[in-house]
Image: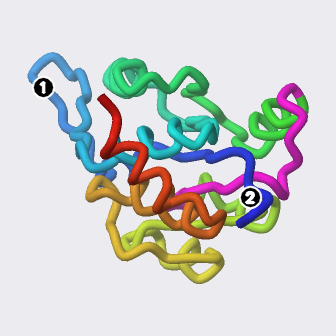
Amino acid sequence: MKNIKLLVSDVDGVWTDGAFYYNEHGDSMRKFNTKDSYGVSLATIVGLPILILSGEDNLFVRKRMEKLGIQDVELGVENKLSALKQYCASSNISLSEVAYIGDDMNDLNLVDKVGFFASPCDAYYRIKNLSNLVLTSGGGMGAFREFVEEVLDGKGLLENAYHEYNTRK
């Protein structure tokens, strides 16, 4: 974990429980958990960038990430590995310096390409079996925050990040 320089996350099944809610107009909505916003705060405190990669392109996801101050958001991505390679090349980061969290088959081609791969406890079983770490939290239940905490703990930065968070004015 010491060499991790980038956190990358899927959205549906990680930040959400994977369910889609539709209104009478056919618009879909997602439910997000505020616990994950603390993960964003902790990553920001230590200067660890976050990239969001999702196969879905949804206004609610864009708005949530914008509210949290996450600038690197790529939605509607068909090939996450290709998108991640492009991002890493432009940021001078190697795939081995990436920690990724995903939960289903569209994340599968990243499992053995990144330095660290985690999945929520309710991820698709094949993904869990191939993950470096299966989290105790499920998707939409603080999985992203737990992921960030695990990475920061592995880098020896977690306690200082919490201290910094709790002493900000």
> Which x, y percent locates residue 163?
40, 52
Q: Which residue is mark 1?
A: 23
Is 136 or 127 nearer to us in this picture? 136
Q: State the SS at label 2.
A: helix
> Which x, y percent locates residue 5?
74, 47
- The numbered dot on residue 165 is none
> Which x, y percent locates residue 52?
56, 36
Q: Amino acid at mark 2?
A: Asn
Which residue is found at the position 50% from the left and 60% from the top? Answer: 158
How dense is the environment of label 1, judged by Cα within 10 Å: few (below 14), some, or many (20 and up)?
few
Counting residues from the N terminus, which is met first, the one under dot 2 or under dot 1? 1
Which residue is found at the position 31% from the left and 46% from the top? Answer: 166
Q: Which residue is mark 2?
A: 109
Could you give the CA–CA distance between mark 2 and mark 1, rounded to whole angstroms? 33 Å
Q: Is residue 69 magenta?
A: no
Could you say which quadrant of the image residue 26 lies in? top left
Q: In the image, 52: left or right of 18?
A: right
Q: Amino acid at mark 1?
A: Asn
Which residue is found at the position 41% from the left and 46% from the top? Answer: 12
Q: Is residue 94 magenta?
A: yes
Magenta-colored span: 90-104
